[in-house]
Amino acid sequence: MLTAKLDDWRVAQVAKTVWMGHGALEYIEAVGDDVPEGKLTSFPMSVKLEKGEVVVFSWIRYTSREERDRILALVMADPRSQDHMSPESIPFDGKRMIFGGFIILVS
């Protein structure tokens, strides 16, 4: 994401409202503060970070995989999400986004 577009990141507040409203336990979006480029791999390398950009890392916590799937379906169908999902309205290049589900090992 372009550093200059961080002011446009209010879309994250809408996303948080939608996800939490449908049952997510936690919604976090964080801007890279100390994210160095690695020798073999790193956050900057994985997203092909360009000059003037910053890495944004986010996660959403659910009670279970089943809840995640249920909530995600609701979020995708929610009109508030539809208003912010077009490539023209998101302040980042969605093709460079990395996502997945994880099971907590230690908490």
Image (cartoon, rainbow, N blue to C red):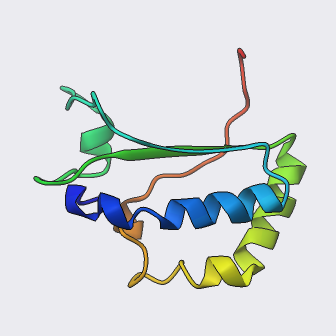
Position of residue 82 relative to residue 13, above or below, is below
Would residue 96 appear left or right of 74 to someone viewing this image?
left
At x 60%, y 48%, the residue is 100
The quadrant of the image that shows the C terminus is: top right
Would residue 65 appear left or right of 83 to someone viewing this image?
right
At x 21%, y 29%, the residue is 36
At x 58%, y 85%, the residue is 83
The quadrant of the image that shows the N terminus is: bottom left
At x 76%, y 55%, the residue is 20
Position in image of residue 32 (x %, y %)? 33, 38
Would residue 39 appear left or right of 26 to someone viewing this image?
left
In this rendered view, identify the residue nearer to me: 101 or 27.
27
Position in image of residue 28 (x %, y %)? 58, 43
Position of residue 35 relative to residue 85, above or below, is above
Position in image of residue 41 (x %, y %)? 28, 32
Q: Going by the picture, which residue comes out furthest to the left?
A: 51
> Could you say which quadrant of the image residue 94 lies in?
bottom left
Position of residue 25 relative to residue 99, above or below, is above
> Could you say which quadrant of the image residue 7 lies in?
bottom left
Position of residue 27 relative to residue 20, above or below, is above
Position in image of residue 79 (x %, y %)? 71, 84
Q: Going by the picture, which residue comes out furthest to the top?
A: 106
